[in-house]
Image: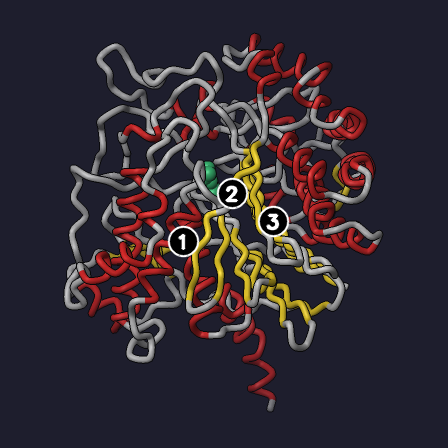
Amino acid sequence: MNSYIRTLPYLLLFLFSINLISAQTYAKNGMVVSSNMESSKVGRAILQKGGNAIDAAVATAFSLAVTLPSAGNIGGGGFIVYMDSKGKATTIDFREKAPLAATNDMYLDKEGELIKGINHNTVKAIGVPGTVAGLYLAHRKYGKLPWKDLVQPAIDQATNGFTFNWSLFKAAEYFTKEGNDNRFMDNYFRNENGTVLQPTENWKQPQLANTLSIIREKGKDGFYKGEVAKKIVQWMKENEGIITKKDLKKYEAIERKPMEGSYKGYKIYSMPPPSSGGVALIEMMNLMEQADFKEIEFNSTAYVHLLTEAMRRTFADRAEHLGDPDFNLDMPLEKLISKEFAKQRFNGIDMTKASVSDSTKFGQLYDGESTTHLSVLDKHGNAVSLTYTLEYSYGSKMGSEELGFIFNNEMGDFNPQAGITKSNGQIGTAPNLVAPEKRMLSSMTPTIVAKNDKPYLVIGSPGGRTIINTVFQTVFNVLEYNMPVNKAIEALKIHHQWLPDVIRYEKHLLSPDTKKALENMGHTLEPRENLGALMGITWDDEKKVMTGASDSSRPDGGAAGY
Ligand code: DON
């Protein structure tokens, strides 16, 4: 017994380290799951006040702009997939746009070579933000409570402060260490006395509170016109940025028809272009439908091989065909998501050896660490799946001190150099080249799966190009293996994106034998600490119970239900 007690802490530590512990939360009336529990609670309070899923999602998103500034934002953009209780689905596209002054050679030197880092790490990486317009449009069309009530909780959190957590502290340590010359980020995490905030301290953000108050009063115009817009433009002028008053004034969020697919009787609704997420997810689910998973065991060599080959092909199609639909009127979307196409693709897979990704063709780079997803289900059965981002963690790491928020660096998602596709993953295809007012291609995959025309699974994740694959595997785990949502989220994830031709895998979750067998088939493997940070909800229509789970890779995240 004594030795049991002695080993218990080590066992728990081990289980935590391999990401196997993730609680599920059950609720009858409403559920919000996000990467910050304080923000999930904001969303839950809105549901309890009589708000619907859209209201709760809007309030949670504004709150995450305060509690999770690495990814939660008003200076970035994203997507919403919404399904009402009758099974009608729609989407809101609030992706950032290239400014009017952008050109397709803006990241090249005189010789036509890409200037390293310019499209990600400079002021030219900032796209016209879409978040406030997107949340406003979602609320205007589908919300119920007054707009002011949805912005107010975030203002309260920014004004009164909230507990500075460990993840924020790690960022504060990084940005304030000697040699870091980013003045804006250095000042960002300091308290009123100018000292760097410590874990458990109360963090107030008065400038952000003020900006949010203007948005509360004026709605969308509070960001894109007037005082805030003026300060954004002034900051751009002072810092050689190219976003103008006209860019802000012209920005509109767009309602678009979802990408719709199916898997063994379930319906799948996800984001259409300018995200590649929906097309890619449905293409891979169709490929899976061709296989017999009674013969292929979960986590086995055949399983990892088949998923890899599906990912390889899908990412090649993504790179070849996808971009902003308003600039690419002839994308073969229906073909890519058809069952017929999946059949052809499936027949081309050799189950005994790896295919080769041709470096003269297609693929994409692996992204950094930050974007965030939230899922909501309300008591009427309306569901919201929302993913939004600044692109990198803390985006461009630039912003106006007066306004208190960070600008995205989303322009890095465009193909930077026409015609140049490299085996390291740089893509040069036409559909996603930079053009004025174009939206850059995304991988965000907010998704809702319906069973009998009612929301059944609400899911999404951050993780750059890995998003498509981690959402795909989580959806697949629930639909094919009937896994409870927390197990589906924590189970092994792999990632292959055509180029570079490598399988990334969560290192504690693949056995040595399987790795060896895959290498013998011609695959190259690369371990990763973690893939994805999935936030999901399932609905049991028989028991009338919601189950929520947040990925253990985001320790501050959580499911708030009632
Ligand atoms: O839109 C996209 O696909 C990327 N900008 C998302 C970036 C991301 O997820 C970063 N990581 N966690």
Q: Is mark 2 within 8 Å of ligand 1?
A: no
Q: Which residue is mark 2?
A: 257
Tag of residue 320: none
Residue at the bottom extreme of this rendering? 1
**First-in-chain label (1 vs 3):** 3
Disc 1 versus disc 3: distance between alpha carbons? 17 Å
**First-in-chain label (2 vs 3):** 3
Q: Are marks 2 and 1 in contact (CB under 8 Å)?
A: no
Quarter of the image where one finds residue 411: top left
Q: Position of residue 238 (x, y in %)?
A: 57, 8
The residue mark sitting in front, 1 or 3, is 3
Disc 2 versus disc 1: distance between alpha carbons? 16 Å
The residue type indicated by label 3 comes to Tyr
Q: Which residue is mark 3?
A: 82
Q: Is residue 257 left or right of residue 303?
A: right
Q: Position of residue 13 (x, y in %)?
A: 54, 69
Mark 1 Cα-neighbour bin, 10 Å: few <14, some 14–19, many ≥20 = many
The residue type indicated by label 1 comes to Leu
